[in-house]
Amino acid sequence: MRAHTLDAYVVLGVDREYDLTEDALLRAMDQAGVARAVVAAPDRQLAVAEREGNDAMLAAAGRRPDRFVPSCTANPWRGEAAVDEVRRALGAGARMVVLHPAVQGVQANDELVWPLVAAAARAGAPVYVHTGPPGHATPWMVVDLARRFPEAALILGHCGATDLWNDVVPAARAAENLYLESSLARPFLFAGYLRELGAGRGVMGSFAPLNDLGFEWARMREVLAPEAYAQVYGPTLAGLLGEGRP
Amino acid sequence: MIVDCHTHWGMAWTARDGEDPARWLAELDRLGVDRAVVMPHEGIRRLDRCAADNDRVARVARRAAGRLLPAATAWPQAGTEALAEARRAIEMLGARALKFHPWMQGFSTAEAVFGELCALAGEKGVPVVFHDGTPCYALPEQVGGLARRFPATTFVLGHGGLLWHWRSALAAAERPNVWVCLCGPHQRAIERFCAQADPDRLVWGSDYGFGLEASCLDYRLAALRGARVPEELQARILGENALRLLGLAE
């Protein structure tokens, strides 16, 4: 297993189409040679049961701190309570804040979202935003956040896949603190974005179990040039998580 | 037998290879794909190139010894000329399907002329294939609405709702004249289609042909094969169903 290999987004839990247990995830990571993964809660726990999901991610990472990096979220509609919950989770060890505007019923650049981004930035945690149609979170909406909070690191989950792909490169050029995450963008498109923007702007995520973790990692290894893969497989995200480059 | 129900003769291929499909077909050979529905690319980007691209796709297909099944497009904005072009493509060029990309072509599926195109397709027995999964003009529910209005026409959700509207595609596919092309949804969604939709109305596609590389074909074939779908059903999706959709079943 290659040290520092880090999957930027895996959904841990069992709910509707999500069916990933800790044991199954560890097996998949071992088989794929992935050292660590950022774990996020299933949709229901992003939308209406955030504390339950945050605690589950923290607990999983507590059991396997060498393998799991916990993320957290709170629905922006909860206002101050959302900020409090994100602060609590970050204080308890969460390392990344997840926003899923389509699931949480808000636009990515809505003012309701701003305090959460500010809280993440203050804690030195990157903010992962699920993007793509139906339009609650487009690449340019995330640019709005990135420019409003230049001290924050924004991760463009799925690169607007699929039909907002045209926007990815110009949007990323408009905000230096915007990073591209690969899942659902598919390796064959992601490689093209990084050729335009530089490999230092990309992070590898599988979005398991919606995608097969091993399959996604294998395809990324095939598609990316070795020098690009050397950044995308983990070092860039480790830096965003405050670990510094290995 | 593997039939790719969603490919394009891309502008990059025209620029490099003219109308010679040899290298395009070599990628199919490499991956074990036998036949493909090939759709226009330039024709869905430019109204003024629509007829010329329909002609080009038909000529390319004729050079492929029956392996490429041409599809054509038309632009509802052209009014009666759109109907004439669709009729010409089916009757003169041998188009096996009509392909529409409503957001790229910039029309609403509610336009009156588009309804006439759907009726023509039903009359001629060719399926209407959509780019779907994208607001505001290409949602599965909109295609489902057309399927209600035109029960004699076969409609294909060319992307199965893509990544965020696959549940909508599942719902639309409850209509007996709506098929789903598994070209875009993630593996878990593919599994849900295979478990819940009519297994006789599922086909597979790759979207191959926009660029010169075949990595999307390779990826999407491997994604289907890696999904938790019984082998027997995979075989039907990849071959038998596609032939039946296209009127080629024995």
Image (cartoon, rainbow, N blue to C red):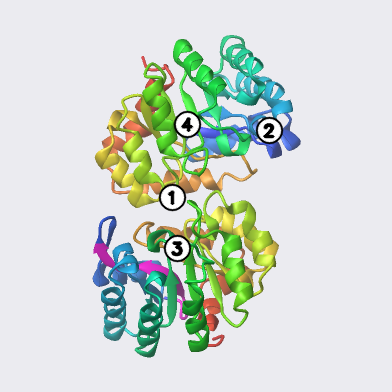
Element at badge 1?
loop
Task: Tell me the tag on residue B42.
Answer: 2
Q: Give the letter of the chain under mark 3.
A: A
Are marks 1 and 4 in one subunit?
A: yes
**Amino acid of disc 4:** Cys
Which x, y percent locates residue A28? 33, 66
- Spatial CA span between label 1 and label 2: 25 Å
Which x, y percent locates residue A49? 27, 70
State the residue position of label 3: A106
Q: Does the CB distance between marks 3 and 1 fall below 8 Å?
A: no
Element at badge 3?
loop
**Earlier sequence position, callout 1 versus callout 2:** 2
Residue B204 vertical placement versus B245 (above, below): below
Q: Using the rendered view, name the quadrant where residue A212 is placed.
A: bottom left
| Residue interval drawn in magenta | A2-14
Left or right of A209, for residue A133: right
